[in-house]
Amino acid sequence: MGNNPARINVFVIEDAPPIRQAVQLLIDGSPGFSCIGVAETAEAALEAESAAKPDVVLVDIGLPGMSGTEALPLLRRRWPQAELLMLTVHEDEIGIFAALRAGATGYLLKTTPPAVLLDAIRDAFEGGAPMSASVARQVVQVFRQPEPGADTLSAREHEVLQALMDGKTYRQTGEELFISVNTVAFHVKQIYQKLHVHSRAEIFALTRRKR
């Protein structure tokens, strides 16, 4: 986002009370962040009234009723200015692809350490596309068996993915590769875009194998 406000407003959609409360406390207790709302379901989030608009929405996938992935287009319509960041236990290819195709900005696991989660929220707000280490490993697996005619990763994108797989932050990745944090974020967004090229056939194949 272009401007840099005093606080990044975050809305949390999570049905598990302990996780929801922990994330809310983390955000409200961290300088530069404010949790402006929480909801147990996507339906409740879509109907929630808030004086402020969220800059970043953390969305669980396994919600009761409408899933987080199904809710993404509706959340995008309600809050077009917000970045939609998945925070979930699901790390399979189908879940990743489906969320990204539905409009997710990034994909993080609930095991993400608190400091890394805050960095990811900030990265998303500033135009990045956060990715957990285990998600990076899933992405590598997909690109090891590319579809005919699909985009492949550049050498630099492979280096960025490897650093993320090793658990490095965007900043640490940039320092290791002698590039800026913004350049790391750019490469991750490019990787996500290339995943869309693979997604249709990959989802179909995986779904068929699991029947």
Image (cartoon, rainbow, N blue to C red):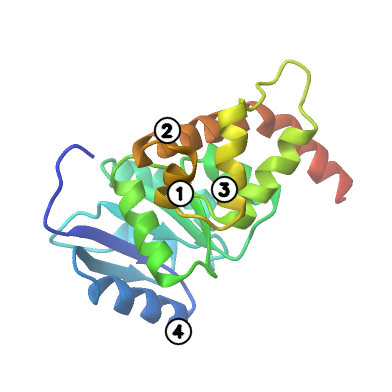
Q: Which residue is mark 3?
A: 163
Q: Earlier in the sequence, mark 3 or mark 2?
A: 3
* Tag 3 near tag 4, CB within 8 Å: no
Q: At label 1, which amino acid type do we have?
A: Pro
Q: Residue furthest top?
A: 149
Dot label at residue 130: 1
Label whose residue precedes the other's in the sequence (2 or 1): 1
The answer to whether 66 appears left or right of 47 in the picture is: right
Mark 4–mark 2 contact, CB under 8 Å?
A: no
User: Which circle's residue, 3 or 4, is located before the other in the chain?
Assistant: 4
Image position of 12 with respect to 122: above or below: below
Task: Quote the CA–CA distance across marks 3 and 4.
Answer: 31 Å
Q: SS at mark 4?
A: helix
Question: How far apart are labels 4 and 2 at the CA level?
Answer: 34 Å
User: Which of marks 1 and 3 precedes in the sequence?
Assistant: 1
Secondary structure type for disc 2: helix
SS at mark 1?
loop
Q: Amino acid at mark 4?
A: Pro
The spot of residue 102 in percent (x, y) is 51, 41
Name the residue carrying label 2: 186
Circle 2/circle 1 CB separation < 8 Å:
no
Residue carrying label 4? 18
Between the residue at mark 3 and the residue at mark 2, the CA separation in whole angstroms equals: 15 Å
Category of crowding for the residue at label 1, using alpha-carbon neighbours closer than 10 angstroms: few (below 14), some (14–19), many (at least 20):
many
The 10 Å Cα crowd at callout 3, few under 14, some 14 to 19, many 20 or more, is many
Q: Quadrant location of residue 89? A: bottom right
